[in-house]
Image (spheres, grey):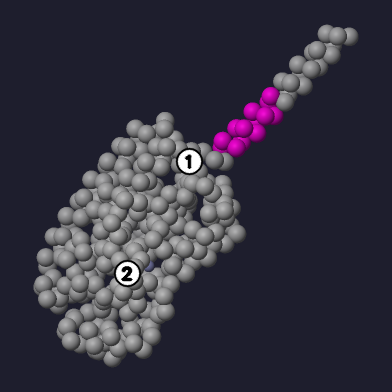
Amino acid sequence: MFSKHLVCLVCIMALMGVLITGCGNQEAENQEGLQIVTSISILADLAENIVGDRGTVVFLVPVGDNPEDYEPLPSDMQKVSNADVLFVNGWGLEEGIERSMAHITDNIVFVTEGITPIPLVGEDAPDPHAWFDASLVADFYIENILTALVALDPAGAEEYGRNAAAYVDKLKELDTWIKEQVKKIPEDNRIIVVSENALKYFGKAYGFQTEGIWELNSHEEGTPQQMSRVVDLVVERRIPAVFVESTVDQRYMAIISDETAVPIAGEIYTDALGLQGSAADTYIKMMQYNTNVIVQGLSQ
Ligand SMILES: [Zn+2]
């Protein structure tokens, strides 16, 4: 009797063991490696370059939307609650995401940490668009992402370090390449006019004055005062071209262009990459694309 019961008990335990292991394996299959969520597509590309094959990366703000106005969806909450880490830019870029996700995860990493910000014009607040300086991406964004990944997955430290070093080399090349390209623009023409004044870091790093109709997409857009200020500036400075952004309402710049007879030289990518398969579907390609559009527009 006793031995029969014992055998049954062993059977049950073995069966439970199979079931538990089975479940465990299934979970492991669904969540292979690190699960990374980023606010914007630009950060997703940076994180992908560092994590390599040891994890997967998704981003929340759809390509074409601007992060300043983005309010997360229930599916975003789900993604973040299942993730190991959420990377955000910070400095007011993704206020809606930060506000919602603070309750969902305790692992939000600000990739701008350590950077000395450029302030918004007329405000005591940082401009968030620091990724427009490739050397800041190399020295801070990548470093902060690397530190977070190593903390989550120490076994991958060597691989992450190798990936980061290789990517930083490419970023330094990009930085040098942009500086070379800018030399093609006559010095008097080195002024970039866009809708959202998002290119300050680009201007500081590569030698441009930068202007926008408005400061930040979450602010009021296209007021009569903002419009007439930019019209005057374009006329007085004899600016050869203005630009529009992929993620911003382009009608305001169209009005500026009409009123000044200065052409819109092209579309640049500011707060999001281009769609997959486009000429701006990685951070490096986006920076090259923008530089080419700016150089062509201002060289005439
Ligand atoms: Zn922006």
* Residue 255 position by quadrant: bottom left
User: In terms of secondary structure, where does tag 1 sit?
Assistant: strand
Q: Which residue is mark 2?
A: 120
Q: Are marks 2 and 1 in contact (CB under 8 Å)?
A: no
Q: Does 206 sit left or right of 253 as displayed?
A: left
Range shown magenta: 17-29
- Viewer-side residue, 102 vs 63: 102
Q: Which residue is mark 1?
A: 34
Q: Residues within 10 Å of mark 1 (few under 14, many from 20)?
A: some
- Give the distance between the C-alpha atoms of the residues marked 2 and 1, in whole angstroms: 35 Å
Question: From the viewer's perspective, is residue 47 above or below residue 74?
Answer: above
Q: Find ligand 1 in the image and state its quadrant.
A: bottom left
Q: Position of residue 145 (x, y in %)?
A: 37, 46
* Residue 262 position by quadrant: bottom left
Three-letter residue code for mark 2? Leu
- Which residue appears farthest toward the bottom when viewing the image? 259
For image coordinates 32% across by 45% down, the residue present is 143
Frontmost of labels 2 and 1 is 2
Q: Residues within 10 Å of mark 2 (few under 14, many from 20)?
A: some
Q: Position of residue 109 (x, y in %)?
A: 43, 49
For image coordinates 68% across by 26% down, the residue present is 18
Could one spot residue 20 in this view of the protein? yes
Question: From the viewer's perspective, is residue 140 above or below residue 274?
Answer: above
Q: Position of residue 201 (x, y in %)?
A: 26, 63
Q: Quadrant of the C terminus?
A: bottom left
Q: Quadrant of the N terminus?
A: top right
* Main secondary structure found in the magenta portion: helix
* Residue 66: mark: none
Three-letter residue code for mark 1? Leu
Q: Position of residue 189 (x, y in %)?
A: 15, 76
Question: From the viewer's perspective, is residue 12 above or below residue 51?
Answer: above
